[in-house]
Image (tube, rainbow, N blue to C red):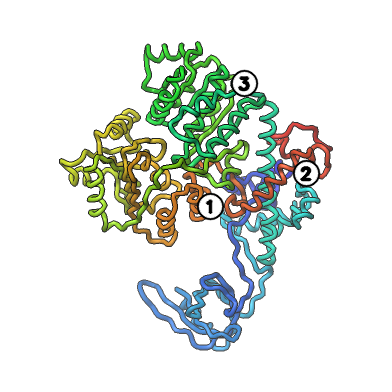
Amino acid sequence: MNLNDLPIQQVKGIGEESGKLLGGLGIKSVQDLLEYFPFRYEDYSLQSPVEAKHEERVTFAGVVQNEPSVRYYGKKKNKLTFRIVSSDVLLTVTFFNRAFLKSKLVIGTEVTITGKWDANRLSLTGSELKFGLVEREGDVEPVYHSSGKLSSKQIQKWIAGAVAEFAGDITEPLPESIRTRYKLMGKAETIRHLHQPLKPELVKQARRRFVYEELLFFQLKMRAFKEANREQQHGTRLRIPEGAVNEFLQRLPFTLTNAQSKAIQTVLADIQSTHRMNRLLQGDVGSGKTAVAAACMYGVVKAGAQSALMAPTEILAEQHAQSLSAWFEPLGLTVALLAGSVKGKKRRELLERIVSGEVDIVVGTHALIQDDVHFNTLGLVITDEQHRFGVEQRRVLRDKGESPDVLFMTATPIPRTLAISVFGDMDVSVLDELPAGRKPIETYWVQHDMLERVLDFIRKEIEQGRQAYVICPLIEESEKLDVQNAIDFHAMLSGHFQGNAQVGLMHGRLSPGEKDDVMNAFANNDLQILVSTTVVEVGVNVPNATVMLIYDADRFGLAQLHQLRGRVGRGEAQSTCILMAQPKSEVGKERMRIMTETTDGFLLSERDLELRGPGDFFGSKQSGLPNFKLADVVHDYRTLETARQDADTIISTGLLQTDREYRYLAMYLAQVGAFSGEKID
C-alpha cells in the first residue's frame, strides 16, 4: 500500500472540512500526516532540582511547606508564591494569575509542577500544576505547528490514529546493511517515536535515523542527476591549441595565484572533454575570478567558438566588457557589450555580427537571453553572480548554443557543507587565495556617538582625492525598526559636506537608468560620497573609493557585510571599513568582533551560518536550499558528508541495478526522474 496515494480522509476522524484545514498545512495524504513532525517536545519526566539545568523547562514533584501568599497588582493581575521541598531542596514556586489555588495548597500537600527553573535563585515559575505525584503515560509530549481552527492537540490526536492504523503499511526504504552499519531504527519505529516518544533519548535516535534518510535521498538525487547530465549532455568537444592560453596569461600584468592556475586547468580540461561542463567557481571578493573566466574564454575562442558572459547589472556588464577588451583586443579578439542601453540600428548591427561569428566574446545582462539573440557557435556560457538569476534565465542562455559548457561564478563564499546542498549537481572550484600585494582592508567597529569623528576621517580622505561609500539598511523611515535611512542620511551629509564634497544617493527604487547615472558619476569622481542601500553590494568597481561606512551594521549578516566591505580596497591606497553599530544582543556584538578580526570570506561565511542559520545566509526565499522535514545542513553536516559518501558509493558501484536491498532507493530515483536504469523487482 502506497500511503502517498491515500487521501487524508482515510484517517478516522478527518472529514472534508478537517481535510481542507490540514491541506492548508501541506498535509494531503496519510504519508504527509505521518511525516508532519513536531517542532518541539514538552518533557514531563520528573527531575531533581539538584540535576536540573538553569533556565530550562522542568517538572518537579514536592511537598508544600508554607501557606501561599498572593499579591495583587494592576487590573485582575496577581502573583501566587509558596515553597515546596523537592529531593531535599527547598525552593520557591511562583504562579501568575492563579490566586484561586491558594485555598487548595495546604501545607503537606503533594504536588507536581512544570515550569521554568532558576537554579541561581532556587525558584520555579510554574506553568502547570497537578495535585499528587503524577505519573504520566510517556514523559515527552509532542507540540505541532498549527493554524486557525487547528490546535496542536487535535493534530496530535489524528496522527496517533494514523500511526495506530497505518504503521504496519510504512515501507522501509533503507537497505538493512546500511541500518545495521549505523545502528538505525526501522522506518515504522522511527515514525512512532517521533510522534509518541516515551523518553527524550528515543526522540534523538528517531531523529538521527530520519535525518540520515532525508540527506541520503537528497544526495542520491544530486549524484544521479549529475551522472545523467554527464551521460545525456554530451558537450561540443573543443580542441584548444597547445600553449594558446599560456600565451594570454603571460601578457597579464600580474601573476596568477596557485588557486587561479588550478581553476583554469580544471575548467580547460572540462571544456576539452566530451561532457558538457556544469561548474561553479566560487571565490572571495578580489580573488581574481574574472582572470580565470578570461583565460577560459580565450581558450574557447582559440578553439573556434564564441563565449558569452552574463552579469546581473548593466554597470557590472560594462566593467567586465572594459576589462576584457583591454586584455583581448591587443590579441585580435573582438569583445561586444549587449545590454538594455544598446538599441535600434546599433543593436541590429551587433546581433548580425554575433550570429555571423564576427564577435568572439559577448558580455551582457539579461538582454543576452532575448529571442532575437543568436550565436554562430556558442561554446562557453559564464554567469556572474549566478544566484542573482533564476534557473529559467540561466537555462535560456545555455540553450542558445548546442550543448555549450557552463561556468557559474559567485563572490559569495559558500561553506563546503552548504555548497554540497545548494550546488550538489555541479562540480565546484574554489579560489581561496588573494593576489599578492593586496592590502588588507582595515575594519573598525564604532558606536553611533563617534559619527562626528568618522565624518572628519572621511573629509580628510576626500581632501586627498579619495571617495567614500555610506551604506544604510533602509530607504525610508520604519516604525518597526529604529534605523537610520538612506534618504535622511543623504540630506544630512549633503549639508555637512556642502562646499567640500558632492553627495549622491542610490537605492532600489531608482530606475535602472537612474542607478547607472549615479554610479557613473561616482566612478568618474563627480560624486565624492555615495549614500546607498545594499545595491552596491556586488560587482561595483571604483578603485578610488577608500572608505566604507556601514550604518547600523548589526542589521546585516556577516556574508553581506563582507560583500559590502569588498567594494573598497580595489586600488593602491589603504582602505578602511567602519562598522557603526550598537548591537543589543550577544550575537550582534559577536558579528562585529568577527568582522574586525578577519577578512577571510570563507571563515566569515562559516561563522555566519553558525550565528544565523542557512535560511538567512542568502536572504529569504532565494537560497535554493532544499526543504527538509528534519535535516539541517548546518547542524547535521557530519551526516550530510556521510550521506554524500554513501550516495557516491551506491551510484558508482551499480548497487541500484544489482542489489535487491536497494530497490526502494532505485524506485525513489525513478519517481523523481533521476534514474533510468533497469530496476530490480
Give the vertical position of 144 relative to 342 (above or below).
below
Q: How many marks?
A: 3
Q: Position of residue 551 (x, y in %)?
A: 32, 50
Q: Secondary structure at mark 1?
A: loop
- In terms of depth relative to the viewer, which is nearer, 531 or 621? 531
Q: Horizontally, is 39 left or right of 75 in the view?
A: right
- In terms of depth relative to the viewer, which is nearer, 681 or 388? 388
- In terms of depth relative to the viewer, which is nearer, 394 or 598? 598
Q: Which residue matches tag 1?
A: 147
- In terms of depth relative to the viewer, which is nearer, 267 or 124? 267
Dot 2 surroundings within 10 Å: few (below 14), some, or many (20 or more)?
few
Q: Position of residue 458 (x, y in %)?
A: 25, 47
Give the quarter of the figure containing the N terminus: top right
Q: Which residue matches tag 2?
A: 1
Distance from label 2 to label 3 (Cα)? Answer: 54 Å
Give the vertical position of 466 relative to 516 (above or below).
below
| Residue at 65% in and 26% down | 273
| Residue at 21% in and 38% down | 502
Q: Position of residue 246 (x, y in %)?
A: 54, 27
Could you tell me the amino acid type at mark 3? Answer: Arg
**Given contact means CB atoms under 8 Å apart, are the residues at marks 2 and 1 in contact?**
no
Distance from label 1 to label 3 (Cα)? Answer: 60 Å
